Amino acid sequence: MKHRSTAVAGLAVAASLILAGCTGGGSPAPGGGGDGEITGEITFQTWSLKNDKFTPYFEDVVASFEKEHPGTKVTWIDQPGDGYEDKILQQAESGELPDVINLPPEYAYSLASADQLLDLGSASKAIDDYVAGGVAAYQYDGVEGSFAFPWYLGTELNYWNKALLAKGGVTQAPTTFDETLDAAEKLAAAGVPMFSSVPSPKTLQIVGAAPDIYKDGEFVFNTPEAAKIIDRYAELYKAGAITAEALQGAGTANSNINIFNTGGVAWTTAGPNYIDKDVAVNAPNLLPDVDVTNGFGNPPLFVQGISVSKNSDNSATALAFAEFVTNTANQIEFVKLAAGFFPGTIEANSDPSVFAEAPVNELQGTATSLAAEQMADAKQTGAPQYTEAMETYAKQQIALAITGEISGQEALDKAVEYAQQNVVD
């Protein structure tokens, strides 16, 4: 196994900050199993989720499983956020990988490629109970199988400043990316910028211009359709539709939201709890002007999953516990603690009122419902082989194209060439 030079995808790390302020406990629910007897000892490892207020949930889940399956013992361990990938690779190389383990897709890929994880698609009848995009996030090009049950999920919605849209004669929030580009042109003519970021290959993937980042051993996001969008951005930049900040470091998620909060742009993307947790707190005067719509195309999916070691000494028990901790009842209890996240089963997402916090503002309720609905279409962006360094380089080249120094096609071709030269399998 090789260590991939990526920055941590970070859902668990970011979640740990949110979870630190949560309280509650788990609910027992029936668990499944595999072939063989459900008995004996297993280890269960989570990532940066152990704290005074969250620990009772896991203790309850473990106790409920052990009560339902006499003769079993689950030892829960938690690893800190920093260095988690190094830790799991060390565990795998030394033959000490936990029986059941919390993994993001990028890290699961490293283990699946080394034949360290159980194919849950073949081992479990429960695989069809989970959100399709979450399951797909753990299915890899060149590696046969499904390597985790989706556990807790995130996504992004589109947020609009209705007052700024109206200045450009746009009376309804766009519902497609093409409509957004057209609206940006109208707003620019009225002196109102739409964008405070540049599109990245992941953006182009979301809107369908580059359906795949990596396929059959090659990076393939330099499509003509993607290049056309970048060239359109270059035209919009000249027209004034894009802020100067977009080209300073190629824009970041936080800067986009901060600029939107100050009324500097008409559009941003953010998580489903953005209204109550951010706008109402940090920009209350903006609240009457905000609208929310679904994400474009195949909206992004951020996912953490539960995997099972292929080399577990008690594989039936490990599989049964993985199914148990990710079943609908336990997932609902988990995301009640993890505000802003969504459960990994289809059934649990059918009624967000069961797990979501009661909205303070009406628009927050709308956002929560939209996010739950779009889980059916949400997909993880990027690819395990696509690193943070590749994303940074691609956005730098795209920024050059937007300022007119190179064409959109040249920018993407250079980004693909760089990615191919630096791929770590």
Image (spheres, rainbow, N blue to C red):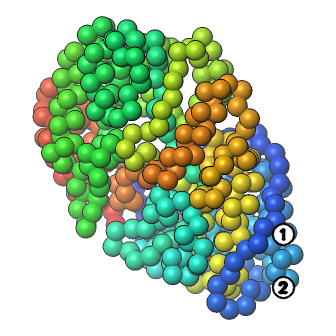
146 in relation to 378, above or below: below
Q: Is residue 340 left or right of residue 10?
A: right
- Return the residue nearer the eye: 208 or 78: 208
Q: At x 80% / y 58%, what residue is drawn?
A: 26
Residue kind at label 2, given as amino acid type: Gly
The residue at which mark 2 appears reads as 71
CA neighbours of label 2 inside 10 A, class few (<14), some (14 to 19), many (20+): few
Q: Picture coordinates of residue 352 (x, y %)?
A: 66, 46
Position of 74 compared to 299: left or right?
right
Report whether residue 8 is seen. no
Between 141 and 95, the one nearer to me in the picture: 141
Looking at numbered disc 1 in the image, what kind of residue is underneath it?
Ser
User: Which quarter of the rendering shows the N terminus?
Assistant: bottom left
Circle 1 residues within 10 Å: few <14, some 14–19, many ≥20: some
What secondary structure is found at the residue carrying circle 1? helix
User: Mark 2–mark 1 contact, CB under 8 Å?
Assistant: no
Q: Is residue 269 above or below residue 84?
A: above
Q: Quadrant of the C terminus?
A: bottom left
Report whether 13 appears left or right of 329: left
Task: Indicate the quadrant where residue 364 lies.
Answer: top right
Q: Nearer the viewer, mark 2 or mark 1?
A: 1
Q: CA separation, marks 2 and 1?
A: 13 Å
Q: Residue at x 58, y 14 (%)?
A: 288
Residue 40: x %, y % from top left: 77, 86
Up the image or down, 381 lies above or below 345; here it is: above
Seen as rendered, the residue at the extreme bottom is: 36
Q: Does the image show residue 164?
A: yes
Which residue appears at 29% of the width and 55% of the height? 212
Q: Which residue is mark 1?
A: 64
Q: Secondary structure at mark 2?
A: loop
Which residue appears at 63% of the width and 15% of the height? 284
